[in-house]
Image (cartoon, rainbow, N blue to C red):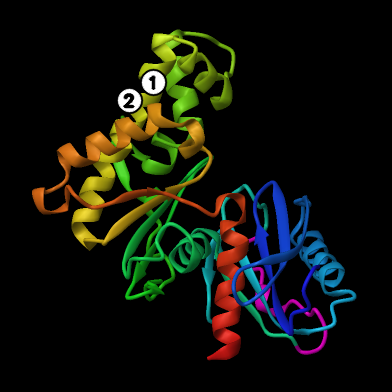
Amino acid sequence: MSDWVSACVVGVDIGGSKISAGLVTSTGEILRRRSVATPATPSAILAEVKRLCHELIAGFQGEIVAIGVGSAGMVDSKSGQVIHANDNLPGWTGTCLSALDIGGGLPVLAENDARAFAYGEAKMGAGRDYRSLLCVTVGTGVGGGIILDGEIWRGPNYSAGEIGYLVVGWEGDSPIILDQFVSGPGIEGAYQASTGTEDHIPLTEIARRAYGGELVAAQTIQDKARQLGIILGGFAASINPAALVIGGGVAQIGELWWEALESSFRESAPSLLRSTPILPAKLGLEAVLLGAAMLAWDKATS
């Protein structure tokens, strides 16, 4: 830690496979960071978060003003309770994150991870020049957050921006949702069906094959990117954001994916929206941590 700072917050990102935490200044500089694999039970997760916070705070000479937590699952940001979570975090539904006792009476602000990602990108990332944003993460699932007038739009039941639940087709009587359709596993499943292989080929290998000249791999990636672009064009028409910010592991595939997504968005969106900027997220793996930290700063200083 080079220069002394008078105050910091702790930002925490709780994901299905990893917990990351950092000591963050008011300008978004991460002075210290820690990460661990996500434990199997809610109580163990909370214990790890508490331990990480204590490690980060230890020896810091300034004031710690708040803790900000971005978590997988739908989160009631007023109460800090997880109101719904999928099997990536078994038993996580009902967990009260604001009850974390770090000591010293520190307030804890909890938010859904996709909305924390959106807030981070809006405050200091790709979307900082825009007052309204549709932010989308495409990885093992599809998540989203909406920024209106510089603030998160959560909705009365805290589900605003949950774009992954959009129904995009049917398989018999069962709906196919966006989360299953264009995510990393969605691309992997489409590639497996196209090649007829019984082996599971990970997305990183499909991308490697695509850039190595394999037509089936390239076509699968482009098809899924085009489908997402068309769906985002329709969704953007309903909220009319000033820009879109897109991040997540799938977005790291590169121009093969990006060009197909952007061209299909431009072709399918209503004419007035076709010039809407589509921006790669800038904060990378730190987006949720930084977004949660900035939310904690804003709450502590409001």
Percent position of residue 109, x then y: 61, 77
Q: Which of the 4 image quarters holds residue 286? A: bottom right
Q: Are marks 2 and 1 in contact (CB under 8 Å)?
A: yes
Disc 1: which residue: 220
Q: Residue at x 74, y 61 (%)?
A: 42
Percent position of residue 208, x then y: 54, 18
Q: Which amino acid does the dot numbered 1 rest on? A: Thr
Q: Residue furthest right?
A: 59
Q: Residue at x 74, y 76 (%)?
A: 100
Q: Which of the 4 image quarters holds residue 129? A: bottom left
Disc 2: which residue: 223
Whether 288 is among the magenta residues is no
Q: Which amino acid does the dot numbered 2 rest on? A: Asp
Q: Which residues are magenta?
A: 92-105
Say which of 194 and 114 sits in front. 114
Looking at the image, can residue 82 be seen? no
The residue carrying pointer 1 sits among few (fewer than 14), some (14 to 19) or many (20 or more) residues within 10 Å by Cα, namely many
**In this rendering, is residue 69 above or below 272?**
below
Is label 1 in a helix, a strand or a loop? helix
Is 37 left, or right, of 238 in this rendering?
Answer: right
Q: Which mark is residue 283?
A: none
**In this rendering, is residue 40 above or below 5?**
above
Percent position of residue 126, x then y: 43, 57
